[in-house]
Image (cartoon, helix red, strand yellow):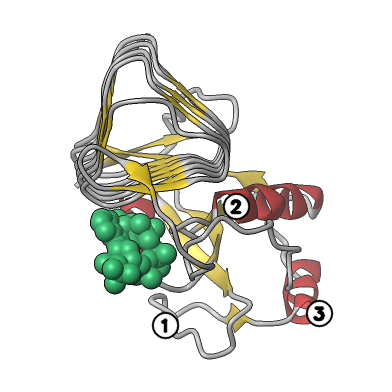
């Protein structure tokens, strides 16, 4: 399997030599990215996760749970071209942006991954740090922001505007001319009808059919989608993290 590799400026790198990459996050999304990184010519050189109980899908690479350990490792790297990818899914889009800024400021290069079995129309654009998984589709003139995830089999059709830190989960269908605000999450197999606006940090539940605009920070579920009434939960929109908390 081959995957495309795009540096931050969006141009394909024809180089085939192996390069080191740091992966932030050691759970499900890291597993999704594992074959994509390998096929794109990256060796995982280190993993970070704030959760000390997190196991690693990269047993050959050290895993750091504390900032001091990461900084110590970085200080002895002789290769000054370490790239990074943030492997945090769910409603963690704003977290990906915080970590993107943090790791960039440490001198690492943001990595954009597009699976070889994904379709990205030549007129579409993919922001730095975004991950486009197998069988995903990005159609004509759609713009995907920075640190977005478009997961397995999800499609975003023509002329959409997708803000930074958005996650479109497996099998979701986003119709044409949809606007998705920064940090929003579109659940698995949800359908968003044409010209709808999904607000910043909104969450569309799995399987929902969104027929009208969704306000910022709102969780909607069902067919047709309606705001979910209820208390806070693991997936309710929440403030972005700081890198190590
Ligand atoms: C909508 C969603 C964000 C709500 O999460 P939550 O706040 O933790 O919700 P809970 O699991 O506490 O469920 C709360 C209620 O909403 C209902 N509910 C949850 N998700 C629902 C959905 N997608 N559609 C309809 N009802 C849903 C539950 O049945 C429950 O109903 P009840 O109070 O009558 O028992 C979440 O369920 C969801 O759909 N997330 C998308 C997950 C996904 O696609 N992941 C893919 C990862 S690869």
Q: Judge by depth and name the residue closer to the eye, 191 or 114.
A: 191
Q: Which residue is mark 3?
A: 68
- Disc number placed over residue 23 in the picture, else none: none
The C terminus, quarter of image? bottom right
Q: Name the residue rendered at 26%, 23% in the picture.
A: 193
Q: Is residue 33 visible?
A: no
- The answer to whether marks 3 and 1 mark residues whose Cβ atoms lie closer than 8 Å is no
Q: Which residue is mark 1?
A: 59
What whole-number distance in Å separates the C-alpha atoms at marks 2 and 3? 20 Å
Residue 162 in the image: state x and y as whole percent.
48, 27
**Badge 1: how crowded within 10 Å, few (<14), some, or many (20+)?**
few
**Secondary structure under the numbered disc 2 in the rendered image:** helix
**Badge 3: how crowded within 10 Å, few (<14), some, or many (20+)?**
few
On screen, residue 187 versus residue 233, left or right, reads left
On screen, residue 39 versus residue 148, left or right, reads left
Check mark 1 vs ligand 1: CB closer than 8 Å? yes or no: no
Residue 110 in the image: state x and y as whole percent.
61, 43
Q: Which residue is mark 2?
A: 96
Label 3 or label 1, whichever comes before in sequence order: 1
Residue 156 location, quadrant: top left
Check mark 2 vs ligand 1: CB closer than 8 Å? yes or no: no
Label 2 or label 1, whichever comes before in sequence order: 1
Tell which quarter ligand 1 is in: bottom left
Q: Name the residue rendered at 73%, 81% in the picture.
A: 66
Residue 214 in the image: state x and y as whole percent.
45, 33
Query: Quick check: 183 above or below 54?
Result: above
């Amino acid at each position: 399997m081959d995957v495309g590799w795009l540096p931050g400026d969006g141009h394909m790198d024809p180089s085939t030599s192996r390069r080191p990459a740091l992966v932030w996050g050691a759970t499900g999304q890291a597993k999704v990215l594992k074959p994509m990184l390998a096929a794109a010519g990256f060796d995982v050189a280190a993993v970070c996760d704030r959760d000390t109980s997190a196991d690693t899908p990269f047993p050959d690479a050290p895993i750091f749970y504390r900032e001091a350990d990461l900084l110590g490792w970085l200080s002895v790297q002789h290769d000054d071209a370490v790239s990074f990818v943030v492997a945090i899914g769910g409603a963690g889009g704003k977290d990906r942006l915080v970590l993107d800024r943090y790791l960039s400021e440490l001198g690492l290069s943001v990595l954009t991954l597009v699976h070889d079995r994904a379709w990205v129309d030549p007129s579409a654009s993919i922001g730095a740090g975004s991950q486009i998984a197998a069988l995903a589709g990005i159609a004509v003139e759609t713009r995907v922001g920075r640190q977005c995830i478009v997961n397995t089999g999800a499609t975003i059709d023509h002329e959409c505007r997708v803000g930074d830190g958005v996650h479109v989960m497996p099998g979701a269908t986003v119709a044409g001319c949809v606007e998705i605000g920064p940090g929003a999450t579109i659940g698995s197999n949800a359908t968003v009808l044409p010209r709808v606006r999904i607000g910043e940090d909104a969450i569309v539940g799995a399987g929902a059919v969104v027929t009208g605009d969704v306000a910022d920070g709102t969780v909607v579920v069902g067919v047709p989608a309606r705001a979910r009434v209820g208390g806070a939960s693991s997936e309710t929109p929440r403030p972005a993290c700081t890198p190590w908390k």
